[in-house]
Image (cartoon, rainbow, N blue to C red):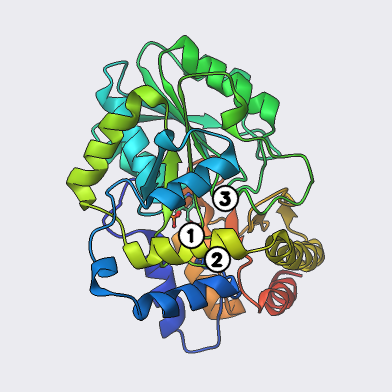
């Protein structure tokens, strides 16, 4: 799971596209629904603007966009840095933690979003894995046991990719307390925050009374614009200068048209937009899980996000079996071993396709 030169999802998407049969792609996490109306109209308006508005935005992001993000989360706008997606915000947080001198280890769950441990290694750090509970949640007591003198950061993601688990406020507070004990950062990736199916289950790490919490987020998934690359980090005040400098040295600045359109969309989009998308996904999850029952698979119904992990008897989640599933069942899923050892016999299916029901039928016919 350490080869980051060629991530398996690129390979599998190509493999599925080259297959001799029709394949339902459940590998990529690209939303398949419309962005908010204001995204399209905002871009059109932008294209007609003066040439000055085509120049560099402030490196840390448009002032009004940072203010809108700060207002939504109830934080001071000075703490907000607009980034190239959640990905860059996570990188900035990790790099700052590993440079901070409190250690070289980054504690994370297994299974894990693969970029976390690959990024840790890229930055010269060492990942330390904590296996999740059978229901996919991360037990803060297990994190406390794994953390130690060399811990620079604890990285968590809720709603979770790949397990679908959602960590509540109490769990975030406990995790922040562990970070405090070791002068480490709790880096909380909340990019799937708008997709929670059990009301009240989700709690942001911002609720923790700690100066060691970084929250990373984006509109990539919530507004169905993963290609726009607009995300943000909310950093403790003492780290903001260092983070801004690194962001500027790496990127100069972010994309101004994308930020402008996102600002319009934050202001104009009603809650019902997010509710509609969440309800659609919840329906798909129901249909897909019913089919997994028919197929005799083991799975955990996600509490949030849009991924389902499933295990089929005698069919471990290897790259070879993912290719076989494409060839023989016409469904492309991610092999579980791409996410770590603890779910190596599982597959992960992304439900961001209008063909989720069709894929479900194919799986129940193939395994049932
Ligand atoms: C857990 C997690 N974090 C971050 C990202 C990347 O988000 P962004 O596109 O905003 O960089 C993804 C994308 O799939 C993800 O699953």
Q: Rounded to the nearest whole Å, what is the CA distance between mark 1 and mark 2?
A: 34 Å
Residue 26 position in % (x across, y down): 57, 69
Relative to 350, say whether 18 is above or below: below
Which element is circle 1 on? Answer: helix
Q: On the picture, is 252 further left or further right than 254?
A: left
Q: Rounded to the nearest whole Å, what is the CA distance between mark 3 and mark 1?
A: 29 Å
The residue at 66%/78% (across/down) is: 354
Quarter residue 165 falls in: top right
Q: Nearer the viewer, mark 3 or mark 2?
A: 3
Using a 10 Å C-alpha cutoff, classify the residue at mark 2 as few (fewer than 14 neighbours), some (14 to 19) or many (20 or more).
many
Q: Tell me the residue that label 2 is attached to.
A: 333
- For the residue pair 65 and 154, the one nearer the viewer reads as 65
Q: Tell me the residue that label 3 is attached to.
A: 162
Residue sticking out furthest to the left: 249
Residue 174 position in % (x across, y down): 61, 19
The residue at 73%/76% (across/down) is: 357
Q: Tell me the residue that label 1 is attached to.
A: 263
Q: Nearer the viewer, mark 1 or mark 2?
A: 1
Residue 110 position in % (x across, y down): 52, 37
Q: Are marks 1 and 2 in contact (CB under 8 Å)?
A: no
Q: On the picture, is 331 further left or further right than 184?
A: right
Quarter residue 50 falls in: bottom left
**Number of marks in the image?**
3
Res. 204 mark: none
Label located before the other in sequence (3 or 1): 3
Which element is circle 2 on? Answer: loop
Label located before the other in sequence (1 or 2): 1
Residue 341 position in % (x across, y down): 49, 41
The residue at 23%/32% (across/down) is: 124
Relative to 146, say whether 196 is above or below: below
Using a 10 Å C-alpha cutoff, classify the residue at mark 1 as few (fewer than 14 neighbours), some (14 to 19) or many (20 or more).
many
Q: Is residue 254 visible?
A: yes
């Amino acid at each position: 799971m350490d080869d980051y030169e060629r991530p398996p999802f690129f390979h599998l998407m190509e493999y599925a596209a080259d297959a001799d049969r029709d394949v339902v792609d459940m590998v990529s996490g690209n939303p398949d629904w419309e962005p908010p109306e204001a995204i399209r109209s905002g871009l059109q308006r932008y294209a007609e603007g003066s040439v000055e508005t085509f120049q560099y935005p402030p490196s840390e992001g448009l002032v009004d966009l940072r203010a809108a993000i700060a207002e939504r989360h109830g934080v001071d706008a000075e703490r907000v840095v607009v980034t190239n997606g959640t990905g860059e915000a996570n990188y900035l947080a990790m790099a700052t933690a590993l440079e901070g001198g409190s250690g070289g280890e980054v504690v994370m769950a297994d299974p894990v979003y693969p970029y976390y441990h690959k990024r840790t290694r890229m930055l010269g750090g060492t990942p330390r894995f904590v296996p999740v509970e059978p229901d996919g949640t991360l037990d803060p007591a297990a994190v406390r046991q794994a953390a130690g003198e060399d811990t620079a950061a604890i990285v968590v993601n809720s709603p979770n990719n790949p397990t679908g688990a959602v960590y509540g406020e109490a769990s975030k507070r406990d995790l922040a307390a562990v970070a405090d004990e070791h002068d480490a950062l709790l880096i909380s990736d909340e990019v799937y925050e708008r997709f929670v199916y059990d009301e009240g289950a989700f709690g942001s790490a911002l609720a923790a009374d700690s100066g060691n919490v970084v929250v990373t987020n984006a509109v990539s998934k919530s507004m169905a614009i993963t290609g726009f690359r607009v995300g943000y980090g909310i950093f403790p005040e003492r780290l903001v200068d260092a983070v801004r400098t690194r962001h500027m040295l790496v990127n100069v600045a972010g994309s101004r048209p994308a930020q402008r359109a996102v600002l319009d969309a934050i202001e104009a989009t009603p809650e019902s937009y997010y509710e509609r998308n969440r309800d659609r996904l919840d329906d798909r999850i129901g249909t897909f899980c019913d089919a997994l029952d028919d197929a005799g698979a083991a799975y955990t119904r996600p509490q949030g996000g849009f991924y389902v992990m499933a295990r089929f008897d005698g069919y471990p989640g290897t790259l070879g079996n993912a290719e076989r599933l494409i060839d023989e069942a016409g469904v492309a899923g991610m092999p579980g071993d791409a996410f770590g050892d603890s779910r190596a016999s599982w597959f992960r299916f992304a439900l961001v396709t209008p063909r989720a029901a069709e894929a479900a039928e194919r799986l129940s016919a193939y395994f049932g």
